[in-house]
Every structure is written in structure tokens, then in C-alpha cells.
Amino acid sequence: MTIAKSDETATSPALIEEDFEDFWEPPPPPTDLIFDDGEPLESNRHRIAMNVLIRSLQQGYGERDDFYTGGNMFIYFSREQAKNRDFRGPDFFAVLNVDGKRERQGWVIWEEEGRYPDVIVELTSPSTARTDKVRKKAIYEGTFRTPDYFIYDPFDGNSLQGWHLGADQRYHSLERNERGWLWCETLGYWLGTWQGTIDRETAIWARFYDPEGNLIPLPEEAAQEQAAAAQEQAAAAQEQAAAAQEQAAAAQEQAAAAQEQLNATQQALEAERQRSQRLEARLREMGIEL
């Protein structure tokens, strides 16, 4: 770069001649990204397990729109990876403090201000266990810096494992609580297991629990709970109405009894008055003045 100074004053605008031969600009990010390779999940149970995690987190976070959760979708984080297409993405992931309302076909790091997933769950199997525990774990630890990483085999209720990224930027195994659950610090939830039937398949599913140990329901479970609570409230209201009717009937009976007693008293007094009048009249007839 050569700068020519003015002969008049040192503070006058400089005429700058730029040499662009040494100027380097990074290549633009790839635009030919694919978001569906047609490969299905390991099994129908894996598909259900993924949806359970996504839908329960959405239900648990309610009306919040500052997070995004997805599953079985591509995550692009480098030109080389996008070119080779050698990394598909996790079965479940969540990213906090982002625009959750925006629609996405995949998670493209350079379109998300460099944000990587904050939580990842891989639904493993005997054929993918080594990849999930070694290769993917290394990517999530060293490249993604994902704070919380879990793996779970939907066909093995004892397979839940998890790691948390420490201050040394290394993964450290999470210890299970007395129920066998693992604490996910990022989400503020426990990740544990729950046995039951979902989408007509009975299994031991990976589920979220709140800090007090309450199951985070799926939307349909929450609707059922609300309907059951409404039915209980209606039944309680009916019981209260029936009790009120019984109390009203008892009050009416008491009022009727009191009225009868009053009538009887009035009749007795009237009879006594009439008897006294007859006695007085007879005494007067006998010449006896009272």
C-alpha cells in the first residue's frame, strides 16, 4: 500500500492506492446443502423415542420461544463436512437463547451466529454404540463444545449414560441419582426412564423430569391430565351441590318442625285462653266476680 501526501497541509485527505494482490477473502459458505438423505431412523421405536424427547421439551417449556429443538436433521458446521456429508447430526438436540419461531430444514452453524447445540441425545443401538461413544462424542466435545451429551438405547432400559463439559473443556461422566436419572444442567431437567405405552408401543422410554421429580408430560398426556382434573373438579362441584341440597332439605325439615311446634304452641295457648274465658263466664253466671 502506497500513500501520497498533499503538498499543502499534512492534515488534508490522503490519496490511497491499494494493492489487492495480497488481500484475501474467505470463500462463501456452501449453498448446495441437503437436508434429507432418505435414510430412516434405526427403528420405529427410535423414531418414537426421538419424538418423545422433542415434544416433551416443547411441552415443558410451554410458551417460551427462545429455544429450538429438533432431531434426525442435518447439522452443518464446516465446509469440509458439508462437502463430504460425512456427519448427519444427532437424534435429538436443543439450542437455547435463539429464535425458536424461525422454521429450519436443518441447523447450519454459519446461519445461526455460530451457535452449536447445547444438549444432545443420541438414541444408540448395538450397531451405532461405538460411533456414538467415540467419534460423535469427540465431535461434540472438541468441535461443538456441547455442554450436555447423553446416549440411550430404547431397547435397553439400563443403557442411559451422560457427560457434562467441564471447565477444562473435557467431558466428565454424570452420576446417576437414586432413581438412575442424570441431571441436565443446561435444560434444568432430569433425564431418566419411564415405562409405558406411547404410540401403541410399550417400552422403557427416555423422559424428562422436573427438578422435583415430576414427569414432563407429552402434549396429549397434559391434555388428559387437564381433562381428568376438570372431571375431578366437576365431580367435586356436584358433590358440593348435592351436600348443599341435603343441607337445604335438612334446613327445610327443621323449619317445618319448628313451624309445627309453633303451631302446636299457639293452639295450646288458644285452647287455654278459651278455657279461661269459659271459666270466667261460668263464674259470673254463679255471681262470682273475679
Image (cartoon, helix red, strand yellow):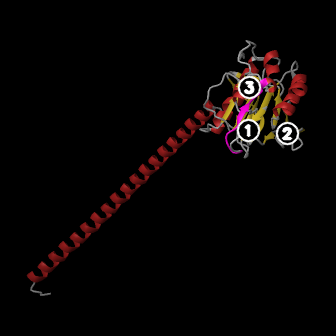
Please say if 289 is above or below 258.
below
Q: Which residue is mark 3?
A: 49
Q: Which residue is mark 1?
A: 5
Residue 12 among those drawn in magenta: yes
Which residue is drawn at the image coordinates 83% and 24% (left, top)? 124
Residue 224: in sight, yes or no? Answer: yes
Which residue is drawn at the image coordinates 12% and 87% (left, top)? 289
Q: Check if mark 3's residue and mark 2's residue have beta carbons within 8 Å.
A: no
Amino acid carrying mark 2 in the image: Leu
Please say if 196 is above or below 234.
above
* Closer to the eye: label 3 or 1: 1
The percent position of residue 216, horizontal first and vertical second, equals 68, 37
* Residue 123, quarter of the rendered image: top right
Dot 2 falls on a residue whose secondary structure is: strand
**Quadrant of the image for the N terminus?**
top right
Amino acid carrying mark 3 in the image: Ala
Tell me where the magenta segment starts and ends, as one range.
10-20
Q: Which residue is mark 2?
A: 165
